[in-house]
Image (tube, rainbow, N blue to C red):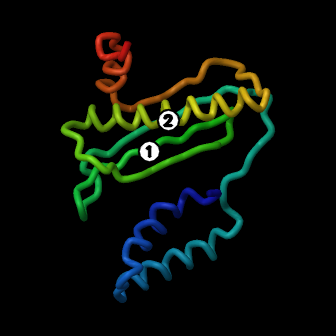
Amino acid sequence: MTRPDISFAVNRGCQFMQSPSDVHWTFVKRILRYLKGTINMGLSFSHSDSFSISAFSGANWFGCPDDRKSTGGFAIYLGPNLISRKAHKQSTVARSNTELEFRVLADTTAEFVCLSSLLRDLGVPLSSPPIMWCGNISATYLAANPIFQLP
């Protein structure tokens, strides 16, 4: 959890655990050499009086060159500290980049609600309303349009 810089590489390496080839073993050795050289790196948490939650979400439509699946993810911060993150391949096919970004926004919103509820149960007041950042303007407009909202 404290090394998001290697999470993608480790995930890619784990996809070939059943029958690894020499190329895969070379790849794993490269990860291990990287870890040896960056042993003192990782996420750290700093003191902050700010209890504001913010999130960044993003997606890459048909981003994986091997299986052409889309990937999406988010990072949620409490003040300056990263407290939740997720990056994954989408299980269903999105028809457009906007649809994919909107799905990732929905995942991010669900995590927002869960974390806000947890903080409220712990008695931690939020200093401001949560802020969500999305890099796709079409998905932002779609989320803000009241016509598309459920009653």
**Mark 2 or 1, closer to the camera:** 1
Q: Earlier in the sequence, mark 2 or mark 1?
A: 2
What's the residue at 74%, 27% (across, down)? 50
Residue occupying the point 33% across, 49% down: 90
The quarter of the image holding the C terminus is top left
Report x, y in % for residue 80: 68, 36
Q: x%, y% of residue 102? A: 34, 31
The correct choice, above or below, for 112 with respect to 45 in the image is above
Disc 2, SS? strand
Mark 1 is on which residue type?
Gly
Q: From the viewer's perspective, is residue 70 above or below residue 120? A: below
Instruction: Find disc 2 in the rendering and name its residue.
Output: 56
Q: Amino acid at mark 2?
A: Phe
Q: Identify the residue position indicated by label 1 in the image.
A: 73
Q: CA distance from mark 2 to mark 1?
A: 9 Å
Note whether 11 is above or below 142 in the view shown.
Answer: below
Q: Which mark is residue 37?
A: none
Residue farthest to the bottom, as pictured = 22
Q: Residue furthest left?
A: 95
Q: Residues within 10 Å of mark 1 (few under 14, many from 20)?
A: many
Image marks 2 and 1: residues in contact by CB distance under 8 Å:
no
Query: For numbered disc 1, what is the local secondary structure?
Result: strand
Q: Position of residue 101 (x, y in %)?
A: 34, 35
Name the residue at 43% across, 85% down: 25
